[in-house]
Image (spheres, rainbow, N blue to C red):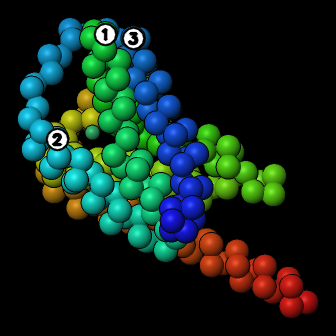
């Protein structure tokens, strides 16, 4: 039980992320397209997809060396697919619009401000969110569809990522999270230095 309680702070950033990813799908209304008819996915296929995104997100998340942030990264890596919402509701719009650098930056900043610490935005969440998005894209490329509207909502065309870029994307995700670990230790050291004066 105590384990769960200590992971509770991961809930708020994940919910904010889920809401922004769903809302981001509405940018598709700017550029209506013929609705994609969803392939019928079988349960095992969905389970593999979900498992893949969770593992890639978790693998990157462990580099924060913080269980809460690792959980945030894992959740974000999966939940970006909430951006299929508008097209799943049969709006004639492009899906996947949150698979974008601007989504990662915008949402990361929103979460950082929403989770202020001592009145200062906690920009660790910006890095974790970049990690979550990159690890998601990595698994998408690996699993077969590396076409992303990476500049949405400013440009809604899709860019094709080469197959092997999944490696770079996942390494990028790990490095973003490692940045969190490094900034946390250096903040701690500064705090200790101040205290020892
Ligand atoms: Zn995806």
The residue that appears at 61% across and 71% down in the rendered structure is 183
Q: Would you say the residues marked 1 and 3 are in contact, meaning their CB atoms lie under 8 Å apart?
A: yes
Front one among 10 and 109? 10
Query: Of the numbered discs in the image, which one, if any, rests on residue 46?
Result: 2
Residue 112, compared with residue 29, is above or below; it is: below
Element type where label 3 sits in the image: helix
Q: Quadrant of residue 125?
A: bottom right
Q: Which residue, given by chain and number where applicable, does mark 1 sit on?
A: 91
- What's the CA distance linking mark 2 and mark 1? 22 Å
Ligand 1 in which quarter:
top left
The residue that appears at 91% across and 89% down in the rendered structure is 197
Q: Position of residue 139 (x, y in %)?
A: 23, 51
Q: Is mark 1 within 8 Å of ligand 1?
A: no
Residue 31, compared with residue 105, is above or below; it is: above
Q: Choose mark 2 or mark 1, whichever is in front.
A: 2
Q: Position of residue 80 (x, y in %)?
A: 37, 39
Q: Position of residue 12 (x, y in %)?
A: 58, 45
The residue that appears at 24% across and 47% down in the rendered structure is 50
Element type where label 2 sits in the image: helix
């Amino acid at each position: 039980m105590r384990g769960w309680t200590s992971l509770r702070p991961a809930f708020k950033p994940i919910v904010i992320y889920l809401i922004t990813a769903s809302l981001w799908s509405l940018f598709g209304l700017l550029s209506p397209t013929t609705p994609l008819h969803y392939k019928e996915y079988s349960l095992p296929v969905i389970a593999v997809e979900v498992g893949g995104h969770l593992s890639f997100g978790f693998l990157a998340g462990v580099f924060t060396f913080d269980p809460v942030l690792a959980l945030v990264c894992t959740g974000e890596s999966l939940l970006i697919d909430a951006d299929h919402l508008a097209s799943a509701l049969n709006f004639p719009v492009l899906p996947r619009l949150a698979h974008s650098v601007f989504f990662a930056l915008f949402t990361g900043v929103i979460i950082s401000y929403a989770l202020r610490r001592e009145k200062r935005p906690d920009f660790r969440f910006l890095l974790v969110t970049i990690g979550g998005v990159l690890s998601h894209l990595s698994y998408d490329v690996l699993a077969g569809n590396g076409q992303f509207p990476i500049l949405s909502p400013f440009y809604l065309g899709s860019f094709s990522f080469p197959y092997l870029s999944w490696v770079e994307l996942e390494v990028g995700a790990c490095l973003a999270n490692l940045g969190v670990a490094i900034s946390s230790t250096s903040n701690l050291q500064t705090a200790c230095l101040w205290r020892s004066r």
